[in-house]
Image (cartoon, rainbow, N blue to C red):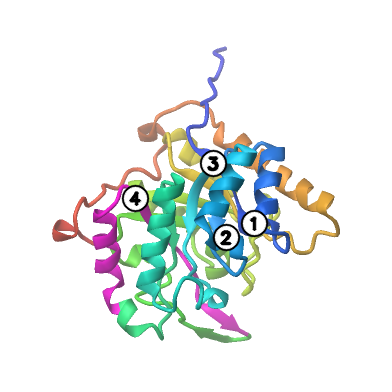
Amino acid sequence: MGIESVRVPQAKVALSTASVYPESTAAAFEIAARLGYDGVEVMVWTDPVSQDVDALRRLSDFHGVPILAVHAPCLLITQRVWSTDPWAKLVRARAAAEALGASTVVVHPPFRWQRSYAREFERGVWRMADETDVRFAVENMYPWRYRDREMLAYAPDWDPTQNDYRHFTIDLSHTATARNDTLAMVERMGDRLGHVHIADGNGSAKDEHLVPGRGSQPCAQVLERLAALGFDGHVVVEVNTRRAMSAAEREEDLAEALAYTRLHLAAPGGTGEEQGGAGDGKATGHPAGRGKA
């Protein structure tokens, strides 16, 4: 009987600084170093350190933890962080990523009430992507639900595969909240899937961000498929640890998430053609010749 080979993961596993909340951005670097993460994704939000490129560089150097991605301030609570102009936020996020050596800027689709921004968003993201080597990876979101009502809060759409972007971020807590077919979304993203937020959920209207393996999402299947395809983007643990009863319990959750992610990224050897799935799509190359995903 032959021995099945195991693929050494190409993707680096990073810790989102949001995963340690209510602890600080600085604490995230310390925890990432102690647990052995490959780097961090900086969530730019109300913590002043998350907005300060020099402070972030010092933390990265001190702990020996590279900054792999910058999450632009796209949340409701960050509407005034780095300006109230959404394009100015993206310009600053790109400048921060370039200064810090991060390869990716994660950005959400606009809110529907940001009408001018939403109208220009698709073309504007392409234009900004043409000006840098940093990837602008547009993240899947979800409809907002309250009881039996649903509100479409994002434009052009909460599902970025309905529009044409050079790179995507898939978030598995968001696919749970949206009640998507996650594997089908991975297929639609194809080789434009450049970034992953690994988390879990059970389809609640709340964006749960559970530790992977604790919900109903196909986290293992997604990671194994990416490993088989030689995915070389970053996989970022973005989980909610607010209910942890202690710092030790929070670290246990983050250690479990890291171990789960690395285990399933070390999938049995094989080629993308044999496995199928993500990576079958073709990048469009330039908006002048682009088509829908």
* Amino acid carrying mark 1 in the image: Thr
Q: Name the residue under label 3.
A: 66
Q: Nearer the viewer, residue 116 or 94?
A: 94
Q: Which structural element holds mark 4?
A: helix
Of the residues shown, which amino acid type is indicated by label 4?
A: Arg
- How much space separates mark 3 and mark 4, taking CA atoms? 24 Å
Say what secondary structure mark 2 lies in.
helix
Give the residue number, with chain letter if any, for mark 1: 25
Q: Circle 4 sits on which residue?
A: 192
Task: Tell me, yes or no, if residue 199 can be seen here.
Answer: no
Disc 3 versus disc 1: distance between alpha carbons? 14 Å
The numbered mark, 3 or 4, whose residue comes first in the sequence reads: 3
Magenta stretch bounds? 119-146
Image quadrant occupied by the C terminus:
bottom left
Amino acid type assigned to the residue bearing label 2 in the image: Ser
Q: Are marks 3 and 4 in contact (CB under 8 Å)?
A: no
Contact flag, marks 4 and 1 (Cβ < 8 Å): no
Residue 289 visible in the picture? yes
Q: Earlier in the sequence, mark 2 or mark 3?
A: 2
